[in-house]
Amino acid sequence: MDQNTGLTYRCAQRICQPGWTLSEMMIALAVMAILAAVAMPSFNSQLRQARRADARQALQQVQLEQARWRGQHEQHADQLSSLGWTGDRSALGHYQITIEDASSQGYTVIAMPIGPQGQDTACKPMRLQWMDNAILVLSSGSDAQSDPAKCWQP
């Protein structure tokens, strides 16, 4: 080891070259692989949670547009195209948005995750229900009346 630079030298036939040995490289690679294996599940979980904001924003946007629509029509809109949407995807494209059970008293808007977000089984789907012209129900997962996974919390 050179006292001035701290580098390790390999010397063969009186020629010294700085560098890493194969075993040092393998140990460094193994440490990086272990760190990546530990970090990736947590990273993916945080990414899925952050993408839920896309669904919340889309469902709340439909709620505002339904209120405008209902002010001029006999019942709530049953198609996104009636509200001015050109497609059925959320703004960032992580959710497919549909309107169900539209009537004069209320409606249900559903955000179904698509693509990589489809692995978010705890919040599949997210729902916004407007009932009896005054009751708002925000739900997710298999329970249509509650949010056990707390998907609606930012």
Image (cartoon, grey):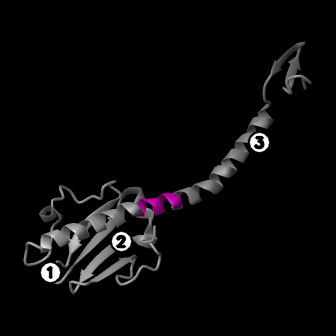
Q: Horizontally, is 82 left or right of 2 in the view?
A: left
Q: Horizontally, is 103 left or right of 37 in the view?
A: left
Residue 105 in sight here: yes
Q: From the image, tell me which residue sits under label 1.
A: 103
Instruction: Name the residue furthest top.
Output: 14
Query: Residue 95: x, y in percent?
Result: 33, 61
Circle 3: residue type: Ile
Circle 2: residue type: Pro
Query: Residue 97: x, y in percent?
Result: 27, 65
Q: In which quarter of the image is residue 85?
A: bottom left
Residue found at x 27% / y 64%: 61
Q: What stretch is highlighted in magenta?
A: 46-52
Contact flag, marks 2 and 3 (Cβ < 8 Å): no
Q: Callout 3: few (<14), some (14-19), or many (20+) C-alpha neighbours within 10 Å?
A: few
Marks 3 and 1 sit apart, C-alpha to C-alpha, by 65 Å
Tell me the SS state at disc 2.
Answer: loop
- The disc at residue 27 is 3
- The disc at residue 125 is 2
Front tag of 3 and 1? 1
Residue 77 in sight here: no
The answer to which of marks 3 and 1 sits earlier in the sequence is: 3
Given residues 76 and 36, the one toward you in this image is 76
